[in-house]
Image: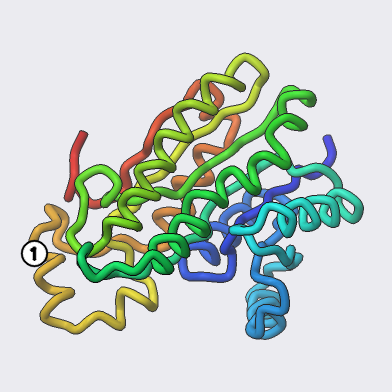
Amino acid sequence: MNQRIALVTGGMGGLGTAICQRLYEDGYKVLVNCLPAYPEKAAWLEKQRGLGYEFHAAEGDVSDYESCTRMIASIEAEFGQVDVLINNAGITRDKFFPKLSKENWDAVMGTNLDSLFNVTHQVSSKMTERGWGRIVNISSVNALRGQAGQTNYTAAKAGCIGFTKALAQEVAARGVTVNAIAPGFIETEMVLAIREDIRQSILDIIPMKRPGTPQDIGAAVSFLCSDQASYITGTTLNVNGGVHMQ
């Protein structure tokens, strides 16, 4: 069997890096999406190469449909069709709702929700034609419980879960699974930058009393992409240390 190809959007961030590394270890050819002319691309690729990971960059703005069309066309021309898609790209623009600007609403919706259409639309029908595919959408615990100051982010990530359920029903009979992962408080560089007393207040409400790691999310992605998860679709896997239980 030919080596399967995995595309991870927002792959050079904290969660994205761990997801890319785990998929590479699982034997995939991993294509790592980043913005066009992303200034840290070369340094990130070189660092990963030094760690033993041979990744390939896939430049494209996931909030722009035409940019995604060009990105996927370039991938298919050089590597072949995408077998596994991880919709991981995401940003935050936090403000309490009365002070939330339309610009910051649109920015979060574009990157966190519109991107699911922009990228998935390019590859899902080709997966069904081949009779195999894995799509994993990275949502958030805040999509399930809400979070003050994050109406934009929460709405986008809740939309991610709805998108997952609907698309899963459309492609289930054709060998393609579509699932979501809802991470909780994960120890990334962004989280480590939070003031210590605020971080502690968050940890206090987590039953496990510790943050998760990016590798926890990588492991969840790995499972959902595996043949062992072939009968799981339309689900949301909570990886949150027990802070929200369904």
Residue 147: x and y in percent read 20, 56
- Mark 1 lies on a secondary structure that is helix
Say above or below: 26 vs 185. above
- For the question of whether residue 55 can be seen, the reply is no
From the top left corner, tell me how far across and down residue 46 is, in percent. Answer: 70, 81
Within 10 Å of the Cα at label 1, are there few (<14), some (14-19), or many (20+) other Cα atoms?
few
State the image coordinates of residue 122 (x, y, percent, origin top left). 72, 42
Q: Is residue 175 above or below residue 189?
A: above
Q: Which residue is mark 1?
A: 204
Q: Nearer the viewer, residue 163 or 6?
A: 163
In this view, the residue farthest toward the right is: 77
- In this rendering, the answer to whether 173 lies above or below 28 is above
Q: Quadrant of the C terminus?
A: top left
Name the amino acid, label 1. Asp
Q: Quadrant of residue 64?
A: bottom right
Residue shown at 70% from the left, 27% from the top: 132
Q: Is residue 188 above or below residue 118?
A: below
* Left or right, 72 with reference to 41: right
Q: How many marks?
A: 1
Q: Nearer the viewer, residue 197 or 3?
A: 197
Residue at 82%, 54% (x, y): give it.
Answer: 75
Judge left or right: residue 185 versus residue 59: left
What is the residue that sits farthest to the top in this orientation? 173
Image quarter of the N terminus? top right
Q: Is residue 96 left or right of residue 3?
A: left
Q: Residue at x 64, y 79 (%)?
A: 44
- Is residue 229 visible in the rendered image? The answer is yes
The colour scheme used to paint the residues is rainbow
